[in-house]
Image (tube, rainbow, N blue to C red):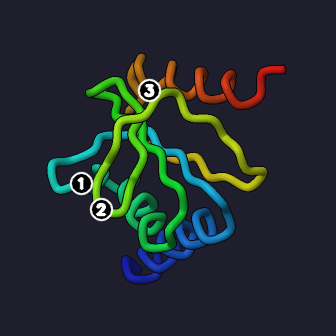
């Protein structure tokens, strides 16, 4: 049943985003300021919940942070909260893999 599967996906996104203090995404920011694909659902929900949202755009090779109604390019972000969510495309490229590695090193390296 497609409806049941769709409901489960939305519930999963809700639990991932609702229970955290900040969100990190690897994907592609589209011209309409959304993030491409299913990854974008979590990003949009993060916006609605006013969660700090950081997106690494693989094509641009840069991190962006969502402001009131637009993306602002940012330097290397850090995970600052104990409860965070990380999500993204299943089509990680070299830039995306490096972004994840750099994020964790910047956040947790002692």
Disc with the residue nearer the chain's start (3 vs 1): 1
The answer to whether 84 is drawn above or below residue 79 in the figure is below
Disc with the residue nearer the chain's start (3 vs 2): 2
Q: Position of residue 77 (x, y in %)?
A: 56, 34
Between the residue at mark 3 and the residue at mark 1, the CA separation in whole angstroms equals: 19 Å
Q: Which residue is mark 3?
A: 96
Which image quarter is the N terminus in? bottom left
What secondary structure is marked by label 3?
helix
As drawn, the residue found furthest toward the right would be 110
What secondary structure is marked by label 1?
loop
Tell me if 66 is positioned left or right of 85 in this view: left
Marking on residue 80: none
Between the residue at mark 3 and the residue at mark 2, the CA separation in whole angstroms equals: 24 Å
Q: Position of residue 88 (x, y in %)?
A: 46, 44
Nearer the camera: disc 3 or disc 1: 1
Nearer the camera: disc 2 or disc 1: 2
Local crowd size for mark 1, using a 10 Å CA cut-off: few (<14), some (14–19), many (≥20): some
What secondary structure is marked by label 2?
loop
Disc with the residue nearer the chain's start (2 vs 1): 1
Nearer the camera: disc 3 or disc 2: 2
| Label pair 2/1, CB-CB below 8 angstroms | yes
| Label pair 3/2, CB-CB below 8 angstroms | no
Tell me if 94 is positioned left or right of 104 in this view: left
Residue 89 in view in this figure: no
Q: How many marks?
A: 3
Marking on residue 33: 1
Marking on residue 69: 2
Local crowd size for mark 2, using a 10 Å CA cut-off: few (<14), some (14–19), many (≥20): few
Tell me if 63 is positioned left or right of 81 in this view: left
Q: Position of residue 99 (x, y in %)?
A: 50, 25
The answer to whether 60 is drawn above or below residue 33 in the figure is above
For the point 34% across and 29% down, which residue is it?
58
């Amino acid at each position: 049943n497609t409806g049941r599967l769709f409901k489960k996906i939305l519930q999963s996104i809700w639990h991932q985003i609702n229970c955290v203090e900040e969100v990190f995404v690897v994907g592609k920011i589209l011209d309409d300021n959304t993030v491409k694909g299913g990854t974008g659902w979590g990003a949009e929900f993060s916006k609605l919940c006013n969660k700090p949202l950081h997106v690494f755009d693989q094509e641009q090779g840069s991190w962006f942070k969502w402001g009131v109604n637009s993306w602002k390019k940012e330097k290397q972000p850090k995970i600052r909260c104990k409860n965070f969510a990380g999500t993204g495309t299943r089509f990680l490229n070299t830039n995306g893999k490096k972004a994840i590695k750099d994020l964790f090193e910047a956040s947790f390296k002692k």
